[in-house]
Image (cartoon, helix red, strand yellow):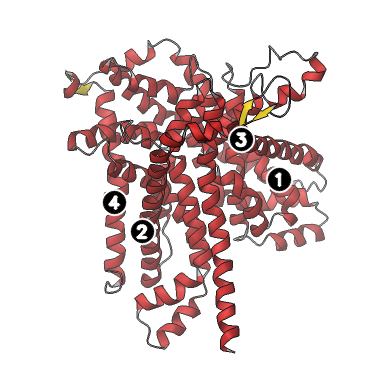
Amino acid sequence: MISRADPKTLRLSVLGALGLGLILPILAGLLETGRTGFGYAPALGAISVSLEPWQALFTQPGVWTSIRLSLLTGLGATALATLLALGFATFAYPYLTQKHASRWLTPFLAIPHAALAIGLAFVIMPSGWIARALAPLTGMEPLSGWMWVNETWGLGLTIGLLIKELPFLLLMIVSASTQIPIQQYRRVGRSLGYSDASVWLKLIIPALWPLIRLPVMVVLAYSLSSVDMGLILGPSNPPVFAVFVLQLFSDPNLLLRLPGSAGALLQGLMVIAAFLLLWLIECACKPIGRCWARRGQRNIAAARMAPIVVGSIMLLAMMGGLAMLSMLIWSLTWRWSWPALLPTQWSLQAWQLGQSALGGTVLNTMALALITTTLALILAIAWLEAEDRGGRGRAGWAEWLIYLPLLIPQIAFLQGLNVLFLQLGLSGGLSAVIWAQALFVFPYVMITLSDPWRALDPRLARSAASLGASPIKRLLRVKLPVLLTPILTAAAIGVAVSVAQYLPTLLMGAGRVPTLTTEAVSLASGSDRRVTGVYASLQAGLPLAAYLLAFLMPSLRHRRWQKTMDTRS
């Protein structure tokens, strides 16, 4: 127990739980995918190791186009998101405080990827809001050449990834900037005649990069291997590579799971190659940056890019806002004729028709979110408490351990893990889905909670110890109450991550654990936009409600405490 364990025992217990619950499933899943990808799958009658699955993979129609699409959309979205985030921080830093960033970025961080993709599809499709707004310029005719959804170059998918990942990178930059004396850098730079843009490019961004490298790698891994957004916004024939591999796994011909496993391994190799490319770019930029900084150029042309960067982010934010609004409007629509900007007839019928099917789906989603978030919070608090009691900071390997589930493509190990769970009789139930979702909820909870925890004044705990409080009392009566807001924020993020999980729920639940995300993605390819809007609205509404509670509960607690103090006085 936490109350009785010495620091070393507590630390080993936490590491053991992480090893068994986090690392072991990932390694086991990769191992199972690896042996199947090289032809060893006794259950399918394949008992000899060979390269035949790889040969079968590369002979599949459209595989090379699928790989090209994944690289184009994944690398392009990550590069644009990183450049825009750093550019916006450069030009808008005085107004980009931690409080303001959290407040304005919360809706975009809370909305699940699939819900955003569905809403964005409503905006950019040939009969969407943008096309309707341009209808007076086109003679009131639909834009026949307007095809951003499911088009062959993945433009809609790239835009969707940008809208979703840019807020995450901005928040990571704002959080990392608190660890750097940015104001001191700016004052020194100004005293030497450098502009703010020059100071950011020559001093601040090089100091920021090591702190945001891992978040950029997380965005890169997700962008290259996205399944839910790829299904909704990406090309359909052939699809992006992660969707291509999922189709092989889902094919009635079970022997296609052999090339599917080879494709899952290739997906992992693509991500590793992208990480290597990022490292090579970083290595190349260092000597170039040093030479450029030594030239001492004061005024640089980069400052002229401010309108383009800020304008691009405002445009993406507007499209994201329209995407969230469009989901709700479609769920309340009965008739929406072309080219009207708003429905001509409103109705609640879509909500009423879906009540019977919605009940179990909503309960499943909420139960999974609450259980996985609670488990992740307990493990994160135990980890951080073990660090405090041991008097140690987090080691570099621990940082990579936390990010590991986010750096490995889900498709690379989840199917293998599903096979192992199936052999153990665990697949297809809530417990398997909880375990799979917790793999991805814990890292985000840990990332959110660790910085506020470490920023807590250690004198509070020492003062409580001097009054005779035991370690468990210091934790329950001092640390947790003071850190209530960060804990609630981490819980809200955990709920949002759990609700957004598509592939872990689909594979580990064997299609028998319906959630709002799995149902919304399956409905996105249907013809009834109203029902799709209902599921997407609920999918986005649950995380937003969690964030709202996280913001309101500390205020309500403070007001109640204030009333109690006023009554006593």
Position of 434 compared to 345: left or right? left
Q: Are marks 1 and 4 in contact (CB under 8 Å)?
A: no
User: Looking at this view, is 246 or 327 the one in front?
Assistant: 327
Q: Earlier in the sequence, mark 2 or mark 1?
A: 1
Helix, strand or loop at mark 4? helix
Helix, strand or loop at mark 1? helix
Residues at marks 2 and 1, CA–CA distance in whole angstroms: 35 Å
Residue at position x 71%, y 45% in the image: 88
User: Looking at this view, is 334 or 227 the one in front?
Assistant: 334
Q: Are marks 2 and 1 in contact (CB under 8 Å)?
A: no
Q: Are marks 3 and 2 in contact (CB under 8 Å)?
A: no
User: Looking at this view, is 70 or 562 the one in front?
Assistant: 562
Instruction: Give the residue type that dot 1 points to.
Output: Phe
Foreground tag (3 vs 1): 3
Local crowd size for mark 1, using a 10 Å CA cut-off: few (<14), some (14–19), many (≥20): many
- Tell me residue 110's x, y (percent): 55, 46
Local crowd size for mark 4, using a 10 Å CA cut-off: few (<14), some (14–19), many (≥20): some
Position of 377 compared to 53: left or right? right
Position of 197 compared to 152: left or right? right
Q: Which mark is residue 379?
A: 2
- Tell me residue 271's x, y (percent): 45, 32
Residues at marks 4 and 3, CA–CA distance in whole angstroms: 33 Å
Q: Earlier in the sequence, mark 1 or mark 4?
A: 4
Q: Residue 262 sits in which quadrant?
A: top left
